[in-house]
Image (cartoon, helix red, strand yellow):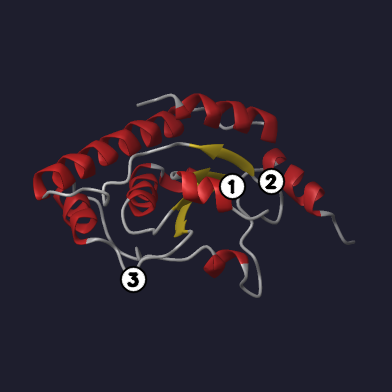
Amino acid sequence: MIRSESARKSEKFMNPNTTTVLFLSTGDAARGIMAEALLRHKGGDRFTALSAGYAMLPGVHDCTAELLKSEGISLDGLHAKGWNEFFNSSRSILVDVIITLSEEARANCPQWPGDPVRVHWPVDDPLASSSDDMREWKFRKCFTTMQNRVDALIKQRKPHSPAELMIQMRSIAAVV
């Protein structure tokens, strides 16, 4: 029997194994990588965390890697990715939630298979800093913001429907 995309999505909520979250940023070198790493580190087996960029940069920024290491968060498997890696592959990855972290990602995010919940968690770009001192401060602020939001996410009970998931995710966007 062939099931529709919406039927498959409904089944996932009736018998969920994990919630797949895709963090989309501009370059996937700082914000998205931090969010992915934090959710992997703290989310246990309830979540599958992914990240990608609208205009992918060549790699994870050194400051991102240093900050994650200093916090005891594994960098295993983390690398900068374009969203085409998930979207245009021979088998698109079905995600439950797309969280855009930059205005560019929000404005350019394509329609995703499976109609995932979409929310916007704006975070200042730590790479947009003119001085080393300002960059370090922005990286720390970005990390703290993402950490607070991921902590709020993992404290939520498992949603029973896409509508409940949307409400939960939008409420977390206000966490700073």
Nearer to the camera, 54 or 161: 54
Q: Position of residue 25 (x, y in %)?
A: 43, 51
Residues under numbered marks 3 and 1 in contact, where contact means CB atoms less than 8 Å apart: no
- At horizontal 39% and vertical 51% (from top left) the residue drawn is 32
Instruction: Tell which tag, 3 or 1, sits nearer the viewer.
Output: 3
Residue on which the image places disc 2 = 12
Instruction: Tell which tag, 3 or 2, sits nearer the viewer.
Output: 3
- 76 sits to left or right of 8: left
Task: Give the crowd class for mark 3: few <14, some 14-19, many >=20 residues within 10 Å.
Answer: few
Q: Position of residue 55 (x, y in %)?
A: 45, 63
Task: Give the crowd class for mark 1: few <14, some 14-19, many >=20 residues within 10 Å.
Answer: few
The amino acid type, in three-letter code, at marker 1 is Asn
Q: Position of residue 97 (x, y in %)?
A: 58, 44
Element type at mark 1:
loop
Q: Looking at the image, is 45 positioned above or below residue 155?
A: below
In the figure, residue 11 lies in which quadrant? Answer: top right
Residue on which the image places disc 1 = 17
In the displayed image of the protein, which residue is found farthest to the left?
133
Residue on which the image places disc 3 = 58
